[in-house]
Image (tube, coloured by chain):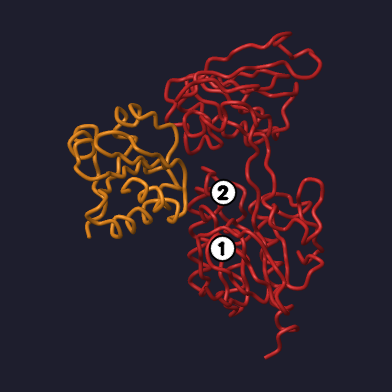
Amino acid sequence: MPKPAEVSDGNFETEVLKADIPVLVDFWAPWCGPCRMVAPIVEELADEYNGKVKFVKLNTDDNVATASKYGIRSIPTLLVFKSGEMFDQVIGFRPKSDLKRTLDKALS
Amino acid sequence: MSPREYDIVIAGGGPGGLAAGLYAARGRHRTVLIEKGVIGGQIALTELVENYPGVPSVNGFDLAQTMHRQAESYGLETEYVEVTGLEREGDKWRVHTTADDFIAKAVIVTSGADYNKLGVPGEERLTGRGVSYCATCDAAFFKDQEVAVVGGGDSALDEGMFAARFASKVTVIHRRDQLRAGRILQERAFANPKMHFVWNTVVTEILGEDQVTGARLRPYGRPSGRNTVTGEESTLEVSGVFVFIGQHPNTEFLRGLVVLDSGGHALVDDWMATELPGLYVAGDARQNSARQVATSVGDGVTAAIAADHYISESFPD
């Protein structure tokens, strides 16, 4: 199972907004400690929701336009997109069970 | 679902819990550390720890990860759930969590403290959308923007100056006319051209729809020499509000079980022992903690040694 791919300002529209399944975007930056705790959980979820939800990550240092477009003011932030629209958000570190609930909601 | 059996359950993965975990695991006790959020607790969000002896300067998250790996190398297990209650069951403890129950001969509570919130309109709604309790985490999103910092202690100045690396202006809003922060920090803050101070003032509301656009301010207490704000409420236009107004111990789940002081801190003896057999409280959650990484580590070690003695005496093989 591949790890969540990096997306950028350049391909956010094609990779996230035009995806045909829900997409979870992990907004992160290298200096963010808690982001390093979220990453392995997102990888596990990517495995468990393989084929049902697409998982990508976006480096907020390198992709300021997208981070600012979605009003990211704190990381880690996970945004769930569905049919090109922002469907849900999880701000800050949350246990895996909470994230699963968010994803299940997006799938129902 | 049947509970999982351990010798020692440690509730909270900050420095105190990690140190207790190291000693408990090295003592060959089957030990699980339960953490509700991020390993390291408060220090995970601290950019630099410069006062832990033997370590001149280290990122708080990295220090916590090192402590965690060290303890796990001796067999410490970790579960990411939240402890919701404790109950005596025979001669052991049953630890309730948001998932499985755990049974333990001894429990070490190192649940630490969480930051206080302002409790004003707009705060909850705009958290993560301009309201923050961690400049180290979020300040980078306020590049060339003006932000406010609420508070007058070490954290307020430390984090305020971190925010000033990115923000064009940082306004410290403090309800008194002098700071509680340490001298060195005060000197640095007053010398920083981006740092501005509004004295004798409190925040009454955080403004903004989806993003913070400002804060409502009100004069607090009696105007004094340094009070530049007089009379009525005013609005400070900022795109971020960083809140550092102290903290409260995470001891709700101990209420009614052990004696807590008026601030919610548990009363323990010199060995971190409560009045109940095999139950210890160490670090920021106990009364009279110095609330330092080094003292929490010391507390955790003390509690683990006490728990080890208690288990040997009460559960002879």
How dense is the environment of label 2, judged by Cα within 10 Å: few (below 14), some, or many (20 and up)?
Answer: many
Circles 1 and 2, Cβ within 8 Å, touching? The answer is: no
The secondary structure type at the circle numbered 1 is: strand
- Give the foreground label among 1 and 2: 1
Viewer-nearest residue: B209 or B152: B209
Q: Residue at x 47, y 47 (%)?
A: A93
Q: Which mark is residue B34?
A: 1
Which chain is mark 2 on?
A: B
Q: Residue at x 62, y 59 (%)?
A: B84
- The percent coordinates of residue B157 (x first, y second) are 62, 31
How dense is the environment of label 1, judged by Cα within 10 Å: few (below 14), some, or many (20 and up)?
Answer: many
- Mark 1: which amino acid? Ile
Q: CA distance from mark 1 to mark 2?
A: 17 Å
| Chain drawn red in the picture | B
Q: Earlier in the sequence, mark 1 or mark 2?
A: 1
Residue situated furthest front in the rendering: A108
Q: Tell me if residue B38 comes above or below residue B301 in the rendering.
A: above
Residue situated furthest top in the rendering: B231
Q: Residue at x 70, y 19 (%)?
A: B201
Residue situated furthest bottom in the rendering: B317
Q: Tell me if residue B288 comes above or below residue B81 in the rendering.
A: above
- The percent coordinates of residue B28 (x first, y second) are 58, 80
Quadrant of residue A27 within the rendered picture: top left
- Mark 2: which amino acid? Ile
Disc 2 designates what residue? B43
Viewer-nearest residue: A35 or A41: A41
- The percent coordinates of residue B81 (x first, y second) are 53, 59
Quadrant of residue B304 within the rendered picture: bottom right
The secondary structure type at the circle numbered 2 is: helix
Q: Tell me if residue A20 comes above or below residue B161 in the rendering.
A: below
Viewer-nearest residue: B201 or B62: B201
